[in-house]
Image (cartoon, helix red, strand yellow):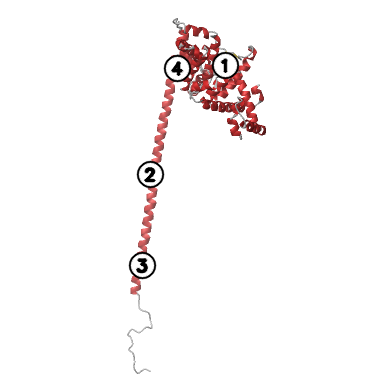
């Protein structure tokens, strides 16, 4: 008998359905395992609580309403109960109230940032013409800022293209200059070599050396 | 009828967790009972038991399809309803304590899966026999016992995690 096996037999034990030798093994494990004993005590207490589950009292008029809907008498329609309450009930929830609160805070923040400050707000600011005027002013501010942004963007793009062009030009100059220089140097080297070769060919013979070649003397011993 | 009204109402509340839905469901159950009264046979048992069976069938059929939806009662709803215990005399000063106790047990039941919650509720709260539960849920009796056992253990552990102190069960 282990804890897992004991758990599977818990309800049977509480209902008195276990028999020997399973019952003996069950109780033996219970005596040795504190956590299983604690679990048994908790489940037993829980059963007692569930059997004595608190009962909610239904509304006083519920029985009357039930008798009325089962009596066959046509129900009298009520504007408030049949139309207004069903329409408003989806909005009378915590979730909707929370969302409405968040929306209100957001709108207040936006009006405070874009519109007149609440401390300076007066009744005349809330007239339709004042609202239309401030709306047109806000639109004008936004479009003006947009034009400024477009101009700044165009100027930045132009500067960027000039800089790129300048950079390209500089690169081209250095590249070509470098190439030309290396070509010049190699040309000079070539010329130097040719000159050296010509000079070597034209150089006079050195002194102490006979011009005619000597014949060999057979009597010379 | 008032006694049945209270039983059906509480059974509906345990499934819906909203008192206004429980009211509507209670009316629907009694309407169905009234419409099907001709099908009641006295030899099958007391009328009271038959009415409860009709109610449970309607609740299970209607709410089994929506088991994945969470129905969380707002705290303001609980304050409008008076709680008491069926045994013993009514004590109005205990209503607040009993309301908290009911909410505590309901929160534990809500943490179980639908199958385990159904089994534990039918057995330990409504007092049905294993065979009755098996017939109602259309599952074998062995499965009923297994679910009840598992449900009790998980419920006890869940409530212990929520409030481990001894005062939870006093």
Q: Quadrant of the C terminus of chain A?
A: bottom left
Among all residues in the image, which is located at the extreme front?
Answer: A20
Separation (CA) of disc 4 from disc 1: 45 Å
Question: What separation in Å lies between label 2 and label 4 (alpha carbons)?
Answer: 51 Å
Quadrant in the rendering for residue B163: top right
Quick check: marks 1 and 3 in contact, CB under 8 Å? Answer: no
State the residue position of label 4.
A131
Disc 3 and disc 4 on one polypeptide chain: yes
Q: Which residue is mark 3?
A: A193
Mark 3 neighbour density, 10 Å: few (under 14) some (14–19) many (20 or more)? few
Q: Which residue is mark 2?
A: A165
Q: Alpha carbon of mark 1 to alpha carbon of mark 2: how far?
A: 77 Å
Residue toward you, A78 or B38: B38
Pair 3/4: label in front: 4
Answer with mark 3 or mark 2, whichever residue precedes in sequence: 2
B98 relative position to A112: left or right: right
Q: Which chain does the residue under circle 1 lie in?
A: B
Query: Element at badge 4?
Result: helix
Q: Nearer the viewer, residue A36 or B156?
A: A36
Circle 1 is placed at which residue position? B78
The foreground one among A211 and A81 is A81
């Amino acid at each position: 008998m282990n804890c897992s096996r004991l758990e599977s037999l818990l309800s049977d034990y509480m209902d008195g359905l276990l028999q020997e030798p399973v019952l003996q093994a069950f109780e033996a494990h219970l005596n040795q395992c504190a956590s299983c004993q604690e679990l048994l005590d908790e489940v037993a207490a829980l059963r007692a609580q569930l059997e004595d589950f608190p009962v909610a009292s239904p509304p006083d008029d519920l029985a009357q309403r039930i008798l009325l809907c089962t009596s066959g008498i046509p129900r009298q329609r009520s504007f408030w109960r049949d139309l207004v309450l069903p329409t408003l009930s989806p909005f009378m929830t915590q979730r909707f109230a929370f969302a409405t609160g968040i929306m209100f805070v957001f709108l207040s923040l936006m009006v405070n940032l874009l519109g007149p400050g609440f401390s300076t707000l007066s009744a005349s600011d809330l007239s339709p013409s004042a609202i239309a005027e401030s709306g047109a002013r806000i639109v004008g501010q936004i479009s003006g800022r947009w034009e400024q942004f477009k101009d700044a963007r165009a100027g930045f793009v132009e500067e960027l293209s000039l800089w790129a062009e300048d950079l390209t030009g500089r690169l081209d100059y250095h590249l070509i200059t470098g190439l030309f220089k290396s070509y010049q140097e190699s040309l000079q080297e070539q010329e130097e070599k040719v000159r050296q070769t010509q000079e070597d060919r034209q150089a006079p013979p050195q002194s102490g050396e006979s011009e005619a070649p000597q014949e060999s003397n057979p009597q010379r011993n | 009828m008032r006694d049945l009204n209270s039983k059906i109402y509480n059974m509906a509340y345990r499934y819906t967790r909203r008192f206004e839905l429980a009211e509507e469901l209670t009316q629907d159950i009694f309407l169905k009972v009234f419409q099907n009264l001709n099908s009641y046979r006295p030899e099958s048992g007391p009328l009271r038991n038959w009415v409860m069976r009709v109610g449970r069938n309607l609740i299970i059929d209607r709410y089994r399809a929506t088991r994945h939806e969470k129905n969380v009662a707002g705290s303001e709803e609980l304050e409008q309803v008076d709680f008491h215990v069926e045994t013993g005399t009514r004590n109005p000063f205990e209503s607040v304590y009993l309301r908290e106790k009911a909410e505590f047990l309901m929160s534990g039941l809500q943490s179980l899966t639908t199958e385990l919650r159904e089994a534990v509720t039918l057995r330990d709260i409504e007092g049905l026999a294993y065979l009755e539960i098996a017939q109602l849920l259309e599952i074998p009796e062995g499965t009923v016992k297994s679910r009840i056992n598992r449900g009790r253990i998980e419920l006890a552990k869940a409530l212990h995690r929520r409030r481990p102190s001894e005062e939870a069960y006093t």
